Structure formats: C-alpha cells, structure tokens
Amino acid sequence: MDGPRVTVWNEFRHEKTHAEVTKLYPDGMHQVIAKVLREAGMTVRTATLDEPQHGLTDEVLAQTDVLIWWGHMAHGEVKDEVVDKVYQRVLDGMGLVVLHSAHFSKIFRKLMGTSCDLKWREAAEKERIWVVEPGHPIADGLGEYFEIPHAEMYGERFDIPAPDTLVFVSWFQGGEVFRSGCCYNRGKGKVFYFRPGHETYPIYYQPEVQRVLVNAARWAAAGSGPQVTFGQRPNPLEKIG
Amino acid sequence: MDGPRVTVWNEFRHEKTHAEVTKLYPDGMHQVIAKVLREAGMTVRTATLDEPQHGLTDEVLAQTDVLIWWGHMAHGEVKDEVVDKVYQRVLDGMGLVVLHSAHFSKIFRKLMGTSCDLKWREAAEKERIWVVEPGHPIADGLGEYFEIPHAEMYGERFDIPAPDTLVFVSWFQGGEVFRSGCCYNRGKGKVFYFRPGHETYPIYYQPEVQRVLVNAARWAAAGSGPQVTFGQRPNPLEKIG
Amino acid sequence: MDGPRVTVWNEFRHEKTHAEVTKLYPDGMHQVIAKVLREAGMTVRTATLDEPQHGLTDEVLAQTDVLIWWGHMAHGEVKDEVVDKVYQRVLDGMGLVVLHSAHFSKIFRKLMGTSCDLKWREAAEKERIWVVEPGHPIADGLGEYFEIPHAEMYGERFDIPAPDTLVFVSWFQGGEVFRSGCCYNRGKGKVFYFRPGHETYPIYYQPEVQRVLVNAARWAAAGSGPQVTFGQRPNPLEKIG
Amino acid sequence: MDGPRVTVWNEFRHEKTHAEVTKLYPDGMHQVIAKVLREAGMTVRTATLDEPQHGLTDEVLAQTDVLIWWGHMAHGEVKDEVVDKVYQRVLDGMGLVVLHSAHFSKIFRKLMGTSCDLKWREAAEKERIWVVEPGHPIADGLGEYFEIPHAEMYGERFDIPAPDTLVFVSWFQGGEVFRSGCCYNRGKGKVFYFRPGHETYPIYYQPEVQRVLVNAARWAAAGSGPQVTFGQRPNPLEKIG
C-alpha cells in the first residue's frame, strides 16, 4: 500500500515575524511536519498562506489525500473561495488534520457548525495527554499518556460537536481538561483535530506528537467508498407496488 | 413546569401560490403546527419569511426557547444576517426543530457543516417510519412505527454528520431508507431534524406527526446549564505548581 | 408532571463497619440521597444489600422509574438473580444511575459489556469536574465546573464503551483525567454513570453533587415510548410484491 | 503491511444436517469465507463448534488478530469458558466480526450489554443494503447500495446500543428497515456486526458481501495502541501540590 499524498498547509507568519519562532522553525513548521511524514513513506508537499491561492490550487487539492492545517494569526486572510474548495474536497473524501490554533480556522468552523471557541492561557505549564480510546489507530505506538513539558493551555468548554470518536483528553497543570484528539466524519471525508502545537515550544519535534501526525494522516486518508449521488430518483413503483 | 415558548417559522409561499397547498393549509402550515403546540400547553407565536426581518427580531428570538423551521422554495431569500442571529441563539441554548425540506435551509446547513443533500422522488408512495431508539423522549406515545400513506421520498445518502442520537429510520415503498429523526447538540442548543412534511400532503394533520412535533419541542427546549465563558484564563500556577 | 418514583439502592456496609463512614452517614448514604430527591418532589424508597432479595422484589422494581445504585466492597454478594431482574427492567425502560465505585457492580458491567476497570488513588486530592456538554439536562443549574476538595482519584483509561453523551470530565490534582458523567441508552432504559461519591468524604452533602443526582434521576426516568416486540413477523409480500 | 491473521469460526451444524445448506456450502460456510480472506492476502485458519474447545484454544486466540463468528442453532452449546476467553481477547484488542444470526451469540450479547433481539421473517424477499457512511473503510469498493435478491428479513427494533458508527441500513421489500452494519469499540477491540448471511441463500458467494468481509477484517484488526493498566496508582502529590 502506497502512503497517502499529503499536503501540509501552514500560515507561515509567526516563523517570519517572531524571533523565538524563527529559531525553533527556521524553515517553517510545515517543513518539520513534512519531513516526519516523508520519513513515514508518504508523498508530501507543502503550501502556505502567502503563495498564490494560498498554494491550494485545484490541481494541488485534486492530488491531495490528506490536508494538514496550521494557522493562528491570519485566519481572516484565508480567502473564502479557497475555504470553499477545501470544504468541498473534504465532503468528497479528502482527509483533514487540524492542528492547535487552527481550531479557529475558517475551514474547521465551517465543517463543525459551531464557534470552536475555548479557554486558553500561556503559562508554559505541563500538559499530559491521556489516550481514552486505546484501540483507535491514531493511538498506535503511544503509551497510556504522553506529556508536553511546556504547553499553552486550552481548556473546556471547547465549543465543538461531540466527536464521533474521542481519542485523547488533556490534563493541564493549572486545573483544566480538554478534548485533545477528536475524530469526525464530514461527507466522505475524515477530520481529526489535534490540540498540541504552540509555535513557541518545540512541540512538533517531540516523537509522540510526530507519531500522532503520522497515524492521523494514515487514518484520515481518502478511501474508495461509493460515489454518492444526490437529487431526483426515478420512480420504480410500477414494478414494486 | 411551564411549557416552552415556541416560535413556528414558515416560509409561507407555497400556501399562497399553489392551489393544492392553499386548500390543505389555508392559513399556512405554521398555523396548524402552532395550534398543535398550543394545545399541548406551549406558548406559541409564528413568524414568516415576508415579515420584516422574517419575523425574527432580536426580541422575538430572545423570547424563544424553541424555533421550528419549515422552508423549501425560498431558502436563498432568508437573509444571512437573520441566519447568523438564529445560529448564535442556538449555540446559546435555543432549541431548533428542522422540518422536511428545511434540510436545505441555510441555518441547518450552517449548523451541520455538510451539504445536507439527499435523494428525492415525488411519487406519493408509502413511508413507514420506524422507531429505532424507543427510550428517547421524542418517541413518547408512538407505536413501533407509523405510516404516512402518501409521502415524497427522501433517500440516503443523506449528507449529514452522524446524529448524536438517531431516533427514526424511514422505509419507502420504492426501495429507499432515510435517517428521519436526528438529534444533535450544537453549542448549548439542541437540534432535531424531522423528515415528514411535504406541502401537498396533509402530513401535519396526522396525529403521530403532531405527537413528534410536541415531543421534539419539549426535548429541544433550552435548559439552565452553565453560562459558558471563552478566552484567556488567569494563571493559577503559583498556587498549584 | 409528577416526579419519578426512585429507589435508592445502597450496599450499606461501610456505614456499619467503618467508624469514619458511620460518622458521615449514620443512617447510610442512601438516606442522604433519598432526602435530596424527596425534596425535589420525587417519590423515593430505599433498598439495601442485606434485605431479602436486596430489597429489590418484583413489586419494588415494577414501581421504580429510576434506580440509583451505590456499591463497593460487596459487589460479589449481589445475587445474579437480582442482577438479571434489574437488567431486564432497564432494557424495559427503567432508568439506572450508577454512582462512584459501582462502576464495578455486576449490573453496570453487564450493561456496558466491558470490564469497567480504571485507575485509582486515595490521596484526598482535589477534583475539578468540568461540564463539557452544557446543554445537557444533567448540567442544569451547574457552573462551568465544580470542585470536590478531597476526592479519591479515578483515572483513565476507564474501560467503558464511549458514552452516547459525555457530560462531565474530571481533572485531578495528581495528573489524571476521567470521564465522570456518562450517558447511555440500553434497551429502552437510560443509564447514567456519575463518578463522585467516596464513602469517607462528605460528597453527597455537596450541593452541586446533589443537583446532579436530581437532574440525573429526572433525565433517566422511564418515558412512554413504544412497546417493542421481537420475533417472527407475518409475511406481507403478497400484498406488496 | 502483512494482512491480519484471521480465524473464521463457524457453528457448522446446518451444513451437516440440512440438505439445502449442504448443497450450498459442502465444506461449511467458514471455508467459503476463509477462501475469500486468503485471496485478499490474509492468513486464515478456521474453527468450529464441535472441535475441542470449539477450536479456540489459548494458542489459536493468541495468534488471532480478527475473529469472524457465525452461529445460529447452537448458541447455547458454546461453552461459557470459551466465551469468556474470546471476550477477554476482544477487550485486549482482537477484532470481532459478527455475522447474521450470531446477533444472538453469547459473545455478541456479552459485549453489547443488551438482548440483541430483533424481528425476522423468512420470505425470500429482497434486501437492499444502503451505505449511510460512505467514507468508512468498510464501505470501500461498494456502490451506493447493493441488493441481496433473496434474504431472510431482520427488522427493527434491533435491541443493540447505538453503534459508534453506523455504516449500512437495510431496506426490506416487506416494509422493514435494519441497522445492518454496526461498528463498536469494546476495550481495545473493534467489533463489527454485519447482517447478511442466511444459510439457505448463497449470500457469502456474492461479491459485495465478500468485499465487506475483507474490509471488515482489515478494519477490525488489532492495532498497536497503548498497553492499558488498571488499579492503584502511586501518589505524586508531594511533588505537585
């Protein structure tokens, strides 16, 4: 089985404007994530906000089995026209992996139907991510939990529809919990939200996080289910009734 | 316990333009539905597309615990501004009961995050609606199934997120099935989609259908759960860590 | 609407054998819980392990809309014959509210189909119970979270089927999380598992916990859904095909 | 990726005692199913009721990633001791695919926690199986529906917990519907119930049914998720609080 074709999309602004982030991710977070997925045998390209059409041309989208999405400070700059194309591709079967602050991206909110709002705090506190569905493929290769030593806190109430499958729940040192790994079906597409990933901590270098990214890309990859049709159907009733 | 305050919203166009529909619902479908809910002890008002702001002013919405929505030929005429207000009210706790062809309404699609498309056929065929979750309050007072003698067919694939609770599944004479009674949580609000209700059949006069409408309005009514807050949280870590 | 008829079942052993528990609950935990529910307008009786048939005769069960269950040190002494009767009543529509250490009761394990095992620790640590589904009736009257100052810890992985609705998630000071409020449909019956309740802490005197017990009893109460039939069906095909 | 190791378990009684069934499945249904899975690259063995320990020794179970189960007339002869071992293996991660009349098998009922009862009729009527979740891997390679020309009818209410994912819904000519493809997580194991398969129709020779069996075995195969631990945890509070 060939690995899925993945496109890693990154807003790629913090890396250019915040020295701290530049140091961590000199080529952008997308390059670090892309490397991980390539090493797992996937065919990976990247795309960023400031490219024409944000790098997501019809051709790129047509050749993408899974799209990974990171955004934060510039959600509003993502063109509705591109969001609509990504949305349609998800309904048609493309997988979507939504990372961290992309909870507030246009595409995630459009697919969820809710505000996707949450509580947050930047205090470099400890996060412990518990696996609550250990049989799910996104938990392959993990222990019962893993920790992120310094994380931005995200806390409930996370205003999302209840996930079709809840894989991870985070504990934060300061007293909050969070549904950190959430699977959804939308149309023929699979969507996975994964919480970790603040731009000022080296989170995408952490092996457990990398393992989740690989698992999630595999899980979300488009399958070969039925071509769905909609609209008017012929009347077979003479034959039946 | 006082009954919930319900607003029955109807597009109210077919009744004015199609003689067949006028005959069935001379005052509009909303009046028939409103009467049923009033007789069940609820406080009911109605609203229609051609009223200013479609009859859904801030004041009306603020006083509505459950909104019932029927639309078909003029979804596109519903103003986005009104849709956004209804949407926010649902996330804040107002119930929403979506009827029949309103599967394609702006508000339902926005809350679902999918196309909400389906198959259909007008052949006056028989529909048999099976209760698959008999302990759910929306099934109170029903038998194991009930029939609609002449129905427009709606068939799968119905492009919705899997319901949080699936209460009804329809069988159609011509060979299709349909998830006909679908419960969702969205924000603090409850949403119920109920399939029956074509404008040219006397469906809202049928006692079983009326029973479902009453049950659904009761189930969807806003509760008194926590006032949810979002955004930045203070740092308690000095005390904890 | 009359309140549901509730039977509060308690193992009632710790209260007789551990001085610390006797002091907290001199008449047994069931009496404290029963009082709370009575004050909320319900008709309440109690039953305990050492009564004949554990106090759960056919007559008592037939007159029970919701059964509340607390057990811990003597799960094995509950007769299978009684468990089977309770089980059948749940499938027939009786609600069941399962408290704390009753995660390991025969009746809960039989209804879940899993081991219902978990992690635990007695360190009198702080528990913070977050509401993750604020629109659910079991969250009525609560804030965004409430705290139990000294709790026994229960931690994930909690070996249960994913709840039909997850209402609460607990945070524990020592680093664990737990799905603390879990709703299930089983047959026509509703089941709610609620985590708090260790026998050596005054947890059932806490107003938020009492509010949850009242809400849960109301939510779980048997409805009037269809009388379900099983088995062979007549052949209507001459008429249809 | 090597295919999973599958054990096909068959009661294997009808084939020996009913001439009609012998003719269809001279070597037993299990051999037909085993052949299909082998051709899809899986390592397959078979086991039957009348072998010692029903062919399910500790060694066989330990080497099984997915167990497929067909039973009907002799559910009661399956030893509880073997059922308990299979049950524990599922909780530990082994997949289980439950076919047709095995809805009433001890192992399925134990894992579901409900009666698993249903309506049925033998009238050789037409069944049309609709895909309601086209993005699910068990629907790979299928059309929007497929038909079984002559099927035993199974009808709702099917007394199961709501599936974690509902993949198929059946339409029957005589007026019933049925949740025909149901996915569950139980412990670390995945369970799939698939309705088709009456012993007197050549159903397991049908390509669409074979495709579902292959898909289901792949989906249900044990992953490499965390080794779950239960029981008492050490107290870290000195460090934390």
Image (cartoon, coloured by chain):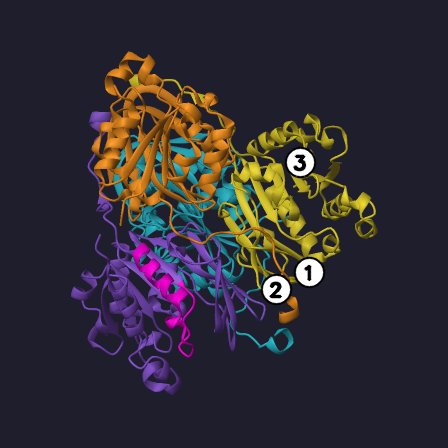
Chain colours: A purple, B cyan, C yellow, D orange
Ranked by sequence position, the earlier of labels 1 and 2 is 1
Residue depicted at 52% across the width and 46% down the height: C160
Confirm whether residue D176 shows in the render. no
Q: What stretch is highlighted in magenta?
A: A194-219
Q: How far apart are marks 3 and 2 (CA)?
A: 31 Å
- Residue at the spot of label 1: C123
Residue depicted at 38% across the width and 56% down the height: A138
Indicate which disc residue D84 carries. Answer: none
* Numbered disc 3: secondary structure: helix
Q: Which of A121 and D63 is in front in this view?
A: D63
Ranked by sequence position, the earlier of labels 3 and 2 is 3
Main SS of residues in magenta: helix
In the rendered image, residue A203 lying in the magenta stretch gets the answer: yes
In the rendered image, residue A74 lying in the magenta stretch gets the answer: no
Q: Distance between the residues labelled 1 and 2?
A: 9 Å
Whether A27 is drawn above or below C118: the answer is below
- Label 2 amino acid? Gly
- Label 3 amino acid? Gly
Give x and y (percent) for residue B160: 35, 50
Q: How crowded is mark 1: few (under 14 residues within 10 Å), some or many (20 or more)?
A: some
Q: Nearer the viewer, residue D234 or B178?
A: D234
Give x and y (percent) for residue B91: 47, 61
* Numbered disc 1: secondary structure: strand
- Residue at the spot of label 2: C174
Indicate which disc residue C76 carries. Answer: 3
* Numbered disc 2: secondary structure: loop
Residue depicted at 31% across the width and 32% down the height: D45
Whether C152 is drawn above or below D122: the answer is below
- State which quarter of the image contains the C terminus of chain B: bottom right
Q: Distance between the residues labelled 3 and 1?
A: 26 Å
Say which chain tag 2 marks.
C
- Label 1 amino acid? Ala
